[in-house]
Amino acid sequence: MFKKISQLLTFNKVFKEDTGMFRVIVVDEPHYLNKAKQLHAKVYLARGFVKPTDLTDDALYIGPKEDPYQFHSQYFVVERTDLPEPQVVSAARLIYKDPHKGHDSFQTYIHQPLYKKYKAKIELLDPASCAEVSGLVKERGTSTAAVFMLYKAMWLYSVQNGYQTWLMSCDVRLYLRLKLLFGRMLQRIGEKRHFKGHDVVPLMLDTERLFDYLLAVKPLNPFKRKVHEALTRFLLDGVDRNELNKLHQAAISHE
């Protein structure tokens, strides 16, 4: 209990941090794509998630054999702008449907031991409506706020582009922390598995219903309520509501 309270208070602090030094970029040019892939390779190599032999010959990127998903992914980066030279300090990506692979486009579907009912549920979904959160990395010492800026950007991008279901293969420790924040919205859909150097659990999240969760849920626990309110402000601050999914514009207008 004390550990959970401590984590909640830490999150509350993170959501109130000044993030003015950071900006999120939806990658659409080679410079930032290269920076994202380089940071991905650097962090994964340091953590033992990949081996030196998994990298390209110049050791800058993870090679296509180990990471075939990079060719059907939308990348996002956080750039720190208060330095003499702006620096990419965090990155992530959304894996989307490969036109030739259907549900096999997603590594969670392929590699994780999914519960039968959730595997069947995924197979009923149009793979074009799914996206997988992947490759979340940050430079050592970078604020966790930068990571949540990436989550926010990927979530809004998903809603705007029709990605209604997120899949994730999430580190167990991160899963336990995210579960404190997102509760029932974060569904565990399979068994824990040791995968690429760490224990992960497969997860699923409905990106559109997350609006309802943020705006309607009022946790009874005072610590959870405080953090939920901070999370809601963080995720909805500065959102251009005219660009959001029409299904949720009315709900947000009553926030």
Image (cartoon, rainbow, N blue to C red):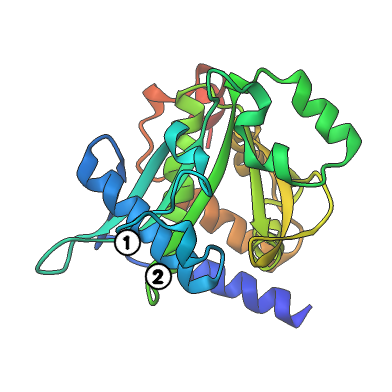
Name the front one of labels 1 and 2. Answer: 2
Question: In this view, which residue lies farthest toward the left?
Answer: 84
Residue 143 occupies quadrant: bottom left
Q: Which mark is residue 186?
A: none
Residue 11 occupies quadrant: bottom right
Q: Residue at x 64, y 46 (%)?
A: 168
| Mark earlier in primary sequence (1, 2) | 1
Q: Determine whether label 1 and label 2 are within 8 Å by CB.
A: yes
Q: Residue at x 65, y 55 (%)?
A: 170
Q: CA distance from mark 1 to mark 2?
A: 9 Å
Give above or below for 15 relative to 95: below
Q: Looking at the image, which is closer to me, 55 or 152?
A: 55
- Given the image, on which type of amino acid does mark 1 rest? Thr
Residue 232 x %, y %: 53, 49
Secondary element under disc 2, as helix, strand or loop, is: loop
Q: Which residue is mark 1?
A: 19
Residue 77 x %, y %: 34, 50
Q: Going by the image, does 136 lie left or right of 196?
A: left
Q: Looking at the image, which is closer to me, 30 or 129?
A: 30
